[in-house]
Image (cartoon, grey):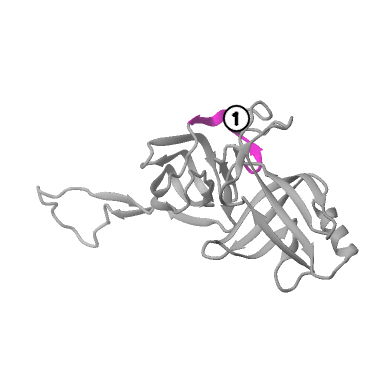
Amino acid sequence: MYKYKSIFVNGLQVLGDNCPYYANLYNFLLDSSNTNNDSELYTDGDYSGTSKINSKTFNLVVWTKKQSDIKAAMQFSYVISKGDFTLTADVEGLGEVECAVKKESITTDEFGVMTVQLKANVPYIYSKDYKELILEKQIEGGWKYPTQPFTIPESWTYTETVIGNIGECINEGFATVYPEITIEGEGSDFRVINNTTGEQLNIDVSIQTGDILYIDCKPETRKITLNNSSIMKHKSGEYISLLNGSNELKVDYTGNCTVYIRWREAWI
């Protein structure tokens, strides 16, 4: 049986040595139901509010370490009372994971034990920390000006290799995830390619020093911006995904840029 080392809800610690609560999660990592029976529509990232996505339902059970600690009980009830919030759990053998959730219901028994039914906004549990890959294009080989006259041999060939704009993204989670990509520098005609899946995303824009080109491939929040302004009209192709295992990503463009790719692993 897996063990939780700490649990935080909306920033409030409800499991651990330095808090006034005991807590446990049920059906959080295993055996949860993926349903969406409420009236709210969750975006799939293409057309906001037009389609539902499955959402994980599970229970959080909390009780106070001191008997009848009404202030601690009311504080917990308050922090989960409105809207979406983040639940973070440190799982032994897995590390810190988190998901955005909302409260469906809360009941309190005669012993002060509070049982909260929570629904995640997406059907996955994500690692808390991001993995990151940095790509910087470099030119290897090519022509160098001679320091003195010489005769070019007939067998001589001009060789120039572009390196540094291709790398490996390893997704150790069980679910397919979608990266965030940030590009800085001077460049144009950007093409992001996952050689493992065959996906290619094209962005026909030019950037200068100080500009930030940002690509969010996650289905629930998809967007492409240049200095925080949408440039979706310059997009063609498909968004990039990262399958379980090794993914070879390549970023082609004209110019000299640094590309930051980050992603979080996910478990169903």
Number of labels in the image equals 1
Relative to 197, 41 lies left or right: right
Q: Residue furthest left?
A: 154
- SS label for mark 1: loop
Determine the residue located farthest toward the bottom in the rendered image.
17
**Residue in the image at 10% along x and 51% along y:** 153
**Residue at the far front in the pictured view:** 110
Residue 221 visible to the viewer: no
| Residue 184 locus on image (x, y percent) | 54, 50
Nearest the viewer among 267 and 217 is 267
Q: Is residue 235 magenta?
A: yes
> Please, is residue 39 above or below residue 101 in the view?
above
Q: Is residue 139 magenta?
A: no
Place of residue 212 in the rendered image (x, y in percent of width and height, measured from the top left):
59, 47
Quarter of the image that includes the N terminus: bottom right
Q: How many residues crowd around disc 1 within 10 Å: few (fewer than 14), some, or many (20 or more)?
A: few
User: Disc 1 residue type?
Assistant: Asp
Q: Residue at coordinates 57% horizontally, 41% vertically from top-left?
A: 218
Residue for badge 1: 46
Depth check, front residue: 112 or 265: 112
Q: Residue at x 14, y 50 (%)?
A: 156
In front of the other: 9 or 258: 9
Comparing 233 with 28, the one in front is 28
Question: Which span is picked out in magenta?
Answer: 225-237
Left or right of 235? Residue 148 is left
The percent coordinates of residue 107 (x first, y second) are 81, 49
In the figure, residue 192 lies in which quadrant? top left
Residue 205 visible, this orientation: yes
- Picture coordinates of residue 126, whole percent (x, y): 57, 51
